[in-house]
Image (tube, grey):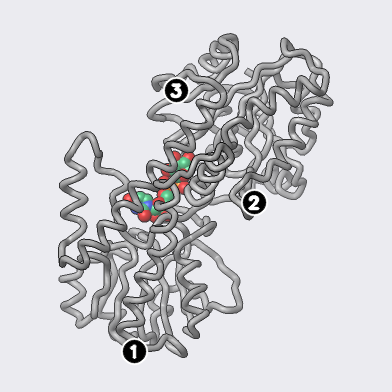
Amino acid sequence: MKICVIGTGYVGLTTGTVLSDLGHDVYCVDNDKTKIEKLNEGKVPIYEPGLSALIDRNKKRGRLHFLSDIHYGIKECPIIYITVGTPANEDGSQNLTAINDVIDSIGQSIHSHKTIITKSTVIPGTNEWIHQTLMEKGIDSNMFDIVSNPEFLREGNALADMLNPDKIVVGVKRQKPIETIKKLYTKIHAPYIITSLTGAEMIKYASNAFLATKISFMNEMARICDAYDVEISHIASALGRDKRIGPYFLHAGLGYGGSCFPKDVRALEYAAKQKDIIPEIVMAVQNVNDSQINLYLEKLTNELTNLNGKKISVWGLAFKPETDDTRESRSLLLIKKLLEKGAEIHAFDPIVQLSDPAITVYEDMYEAVKESDALIIATEWSQFKSVDWKKVKDFMKGNILVDGRNIIDRNHVAGYQFHYIGVAR
Ligand code: UDX
């Protein structure tokens, strides 16, 4: 099938590449010409394990194309994916400028029937609005079908998540496009959840808000466990054994970050308030997440008395392991607060290249700890679990080890005279 994917960000690139690998003829378009040029030269703008090789393979097969002419893509392809960014405004509402531009372009170039599939995360009601807007542009409703088909991809695992999803959520206004979607995904085996356009949008928000709730709940439990001197991982293991709860997303630490959870939870709060509903749980989830960083700051300040002039090393800048994405990274927020308190920051991340004059970034994790008063582990990269702790201790001036992700064997590091700080351990 001939597909146009509009927007070559994280979701668009992954979706387009996997669709071409499944045998479709895919045209990825973006108005950022430099990005398209780079993609045509084989330079992939994001770090996602396996993506670069897959792009290369399908380009060589002649099934994956990158271009900046959106009108060509729309005219040529009966299937159009919308995968442009939907950043949040200050008030939590979404900035729909990019979606608006895409709808304008579709309105100008539509000459035959199009199945328009929205993958971008958009607040409930947006796909109905897209339908309405195209109609207002004078386009007959028989010329197009709008489908809401949210993605549930995790960064770092996006290819596998797209090929083996737990479910395929499809929101439609009428039955007709469901067959098209099933043909598109013939090679993907997963149960279908068919719902309304707004239902599909809501599923995406409910999923992310629920997962964020699990994390914030465990972080709150960790605070309570801390006070009662109880090990939080024991609680997580026991809860995880209960099939009704499940073993995932029960890991306490610095909290959630990334391009999705913080933005989507905020957007759900906004969407609820638009309808005069006060989403108490959703608001509490964010409050716990926001204040979790302070918990660690307090623990560190209790040990060092004053952070002014202290040399603090931070391992991990990405919002989670296996990605170079630092959007809403807890690590960067923590660093910002440490800098405000006058600390000097020496950082290391296995792949993030950060150029911030306020921070010294090292290419070697051990170099980053030289002469430091404290070391904070802010992202759970696996290499931080197998460290030469003697070397770290010898290099450091102080002995404080703040484990912001509860990943270190505290008994092991105690053997090197570290003063270990985790939460509820
Ligand atoms: C998430 C959703 O998982 C995905 O379905 C959606 O499409 C996009 O948002 P992603 O942002 O890639 O994916 O990250 P994820 O792996 O879900 O982790 C999000 C954050 O939660 C990270 O900062 C991580 O460190 C944190 N987290 C996760 C915890 O603090 N504890 C946990 O137990 C799990």
Q: Nearer the viewer, residue 171 or 385?
A: 171
Other residues around mark 2 within 10 Å, as few (<14) / some (14–19) / many (≥20): few
The local secondary structure at tag 3 comes to loop
Q: Do callouts 2 and 1 mark residues in contact (Cβ within 8 Å)?
A: no
Q: Amino acid at mark 2?
A: Asn
Residue named by callout 3: 188
The local secondary structure at tag 1 comes to loop
Q: Is residue 154 above or below residue 368?
A: above
Percent across and percent down for residue 406 are 28, 63
Percent across and percent down for residue 41 are 69, 46
- Rounded to the nearest angstrom, the CA distance separating label 2 from label 1 is 43 Å
Comparing marks 2 and 1, which lies closer to the viewer?
2
Residue at the image point whose x is 70% and y is 42% from the top: 40
Percent across and percent down for residue 80 are 67, 25
Q: Do callouts 3 and 1 mark residues in contact (Cβ within 8 Å)?
A: no
Comparing marks 3 and 2, which lies closer to the viewer?
2
Q: Is residue 158 visible?
A: no
